[in-house]
Image (cartoon, helix red, strand yellow):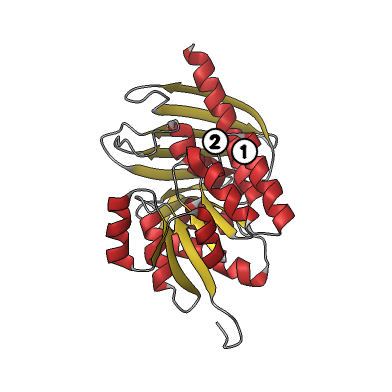
Amino acid sequence: MSEDQQPIRVGVAGVGHLGQHHARIYRELSEACEYTGFYEVDDARAAEILERYGGRRFLSLPEMAAHCDAVSVAVPTDRHLEVALPLLEAGCHLLVEKPICTTREEGERLLETARRRDCLLQVGHIEQYNPVTSFLEEVVDRPRFITADRLAPFQPRGTEVGVVLDLMIHDIGVILQLVDAPVERIEAVGVDVLSSSEDIANARLVFADGCVANINTSRVSLKKVREIRVFQPQGYLSLDFMNQKGHLLRRGEHGLQKEDIPLNPAEPLRLELESFLSCIRSGHEPKVSGLSGMRALEIALEVTRQVREAAL
């Protein structure tokens, strides 16, 4: 940051499991921004974050907006609209954790408000800042078939929405980034296991260019898995989002040849927040804009609709 630039004053709305890491990283990025504090309704949690990261506890959204140029919104998904809307109205640039909202109508309200108030609106699809995705974007050119598996042990956090909006939307966002064609058909199934909405889901996306994506998601698994495989002419790629490693199998002179993929490990959330701050300074469109977030949400909502309709 040059001497003539004022620091971007940043805050975090909601410092739970994910929001605490926004606060941590903003404080570490002291050369790019000024971490001012957070908004949190839980007194015990607020005291813990104050002790850990300092800053100021804002007691209302207007108070936060008065002291922040930009805010990460990391509250539960069903509260995104009620928290993000007044911050946008006050002129704050926002990074709203994925999904942008729980309905298309709510998302469109945020997009319209951001346009009217001339605010940057970025959606926190963190996997699109993972070095794995960056590598895929460089080498994938004609994907014919994609499989994605995202499995996690059960935990109550995030169950205000089903597993499609909670977890599958990560892979939907990545796949939409890789396939340069509209989705023509969706087929989906799901099962409720421990919560009041689907905890396991499978979606098959058929694109206009013939590419097919098959996505498996579960939040009642015994182990964590975050993997993607992309098949295209001459070979396929297999990558692990969680461990940031993978390999490429391609046709060679003596059959299939396996090559390890050289990735530079990095914390995706840090890359995402650095990009958010950079876009605020430059005025450039973020990689995952509000419109990109809406596109992923619309696919996820159709998957959810099919899952719930089949369960009736």
Quadrant housing residue 265: bottom left
Kind of residue indicated by mark 2: Thr
Kind of residue indicated by mark 1: Glu
Q: Are marks 2 and 1 in contact (CB under 8 Å)?
A: yes
Tally of numbered tags: 2
Q: Which residue is mark 2?
A: 102
Of residues 280 and 84, the one nearer the viewer is 84
Of residues 244 and 211, the one nearer the viewer is 244
Q: In the picture shown, does residue 129 fall above or below 3?
A: above
Please name the residue shown 49% across and 41% down the image: 79
Please name the residue shown 58% across and 38% down the image: 297
Q: Local crowd at mark 2 within 10 Å, few (<14), some, or many (≥20)? A: many
Q: Is residue 93 left or right of residue 75?
A: right
Residue at the right extreme of this rendering: 116
Determine the secondary structure under disc 1.
Answer: helix
Q: Which residue is mark 1?
A: 106
Q: Local crowd at mark 1 within 10 Å, few (<14), some, or many (≥20)? A: some
Residue 248 in the image, given as x and y percentages of width and height: 45, 53
Asked whether the viewer can see residue 217, the reply is: yes
Residue 134 in the image, given as x and y percentages of width and height: 52, 59
Of residues 97 and 288, the one nearer the viewer is 97
Quadrant housing residue 186: top right
Please name the residue shown 60% across and 48% down the image: 85
The quarter of the picture where the N terminus appears is bottom right
